Image (cartoon, grey):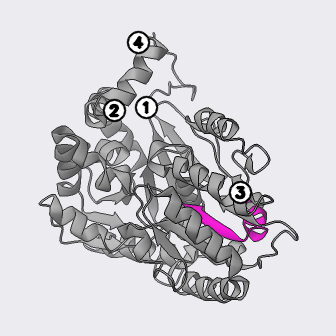
């Protein structure tokens, strides 16, 4: 049901539809009664009820064109993604979006708002269209990591931000990160991606007789699971029955499975892969502690989901986490590279059962007040409406 504030909006999104966060975002606005479309380069294998998907490579019959492939071999493409600045790859891709008629497609869709997610990818592709009003979202590494890696990345972030009507940031500290790049914007909205209320509707019921730790981060370099695995070697000596559950997939999973085997931790570590949201809720509710040694984060949804369920988090001492965790008060902050410090905090937290319960209730209240998805999306909806009213 639409809020009293006004009529349904025509919203067009550009982003990685494989991301569960973007799919949740889109689903929310569909359920609010808005006309929602996704502008895609080559179509999407995943469909969503109520979502119009527009592909640049779609022919008149609604089928995706099969263009002659001039792509380099897979090994060459993988090397490029590992070793070339992301900006070079996305700058080239932006020319493809233009060549295949993104501006004409937008004329057909006629949205009230165009919203591009991730500054150095779909945010950039949206910015090159010249469409207004344009909203761009910084998700984390696009602002916190990529601009430091190359001048072209930094320039593309600047280009995207300067051509936007509204900049969405997931955390307050990201405003200062923009300023460090010499960027200021007159119209910034801050809203995290929010936690579903289903995470708040359960209570933790730890597995009896065995301490269970959980990490729900993907196997990418930035999430740095190596520190957690090294810490487990030390923790398992004092707590031989301790169990660590990894939830998530990623290109580095095999590497870390090998590390677990080499350290002799096969009975202490489980790799559960990607799970449905309901299963993630269940796994979190059965745990004693939540772990993350990410090297960079904005407002980590994985952390907020763990807090919503009532877990005590032990996470990296980085700016994004400091906005949610006070060290020793409602969790622990550790150097993401220091496995000994992490192991010591895990051991301490496992001993303090009553304190963990108190912290769990405190963390649930924090999420209720500051990170319920519906409330955060309402902030964005109001920002959309104000933007449209000024046109």
Front residue of this view, candidates 71 and 9: 71
- Which numbered disc flags the more N-terminal residue, 2 or 3? 2
Q: In the image, 270: left or right of 9? A: right
Q: In the image, 14: left or right of 234? A: left
Could you give the CA–CA distance between mark 2 and mark 3, rounded to whole angstroms? Answer: 51 Å
- Which numbered disc flags the more N-terminal residue, 4 or 2? 4
Quarter of the image with the N terminus in it? bottom right
Q: In the image, 122: left or right of 287? A: left
- Which numbered disc flags the more N-terminal residue, 3 or 1? 1
Element at label 3:
helix
Could you give the CA–CA distance between mark 4 and mark 2, rounded to whole angstroms? Answer: 19 Å
Give the residues in magenta: 280-293
Could you give the CA–CA distance between mark 1 and mark 2, rounded to whole angstroms? Answer: 8 Å
- Of badges 4 and 2, nearer the viewer stands 4
Residue at left 71%, top 63%?
238
Question: Relative to 2, is 159 above or below?
Answer: above
Front residue of this view, candidates 350 and 70: 350
- Which numbered disc flags the more N-terminal residue, 4 or 1? 1
Task: Determine which residue is flagged by label 2.
Answer: 97
Residue at left 57%, top 68%?
344
């Amino acid at each position: 049901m639409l809020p009293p504030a006004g009529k349904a909006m025509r919203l067009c999104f550009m982003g990685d539809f494989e991301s569960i966060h973007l799919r949740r975002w889109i689903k929310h606005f569909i359920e609010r009664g808005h006309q929602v479309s996704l502008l895609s380069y080559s179509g999407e294998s995943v469909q969503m009820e109520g979502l119009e998907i527009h592909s640049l490579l779609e022919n008149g019959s609604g089928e995706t064109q099969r263009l002659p492939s001039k792509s380099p071999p897979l090994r060459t493409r993988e090397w490029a993604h590992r070793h070339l600045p992301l900006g070079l790859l996305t700058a080239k891709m932006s020319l493809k979006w233009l060549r295949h008629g993104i501006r004409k497609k937008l004329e057909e869709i006629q949205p009230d708002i165009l919203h591009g997610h991730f500054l150095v990818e779909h945010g950039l592709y949206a910015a090159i269209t010249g469409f207004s009003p344009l909203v761009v979202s910084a998700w984390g590494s696009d602002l916190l990591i990529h601009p430091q890696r190359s001048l072209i990345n930094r320039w593309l972030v600047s280009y995207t931000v300067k051509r936007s009507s509204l900049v969405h940031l997931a955390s307050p500290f990201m405003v200062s990160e923009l300023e460090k790049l010499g960027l200021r914007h007159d119209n910034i909205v801050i809203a995290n991606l929010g936690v579903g209320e289903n995470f708040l509707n359960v209570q933790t019921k730890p597995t009896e007789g065995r301490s269970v730790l959980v990490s729900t981060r993907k196997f990418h370099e930035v999430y740095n699971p190596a520190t957690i695995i090294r810490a487990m070697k030390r923790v398992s000596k004092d707590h031989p029955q301790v169990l660590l559950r990894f939830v998530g997939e990623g290109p580095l999973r095999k590497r870390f499975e090998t590390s677990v085997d080499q350290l002799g931790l096969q009975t202490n570590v489980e790799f559960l892969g990607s799970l449905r949201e309901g299963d993630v809720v269940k796994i979190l509710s059965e745990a004693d502690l939540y772990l993350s040694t990410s090297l960079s984060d904005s407002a980590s949804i994985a952390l907020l989901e763990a807090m919503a369920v009532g877990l005590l988090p032990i996470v990296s001492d980085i700016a994004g986490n400091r906005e949610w965790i006070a060290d020793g008060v409602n969790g622990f902050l550790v150097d993401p590279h220091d496995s000994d410090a992490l192991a010591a905090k895990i051991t301490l937290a496992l001993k303090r059962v009553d304190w963990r319960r108190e912290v769990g209730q405190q963390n649930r209240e924090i999420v209720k007040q500051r990170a319920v998805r519906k409330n955060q999306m309402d902030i964005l909806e109001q920002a959309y409406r104000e933007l449209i009213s000024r046109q």
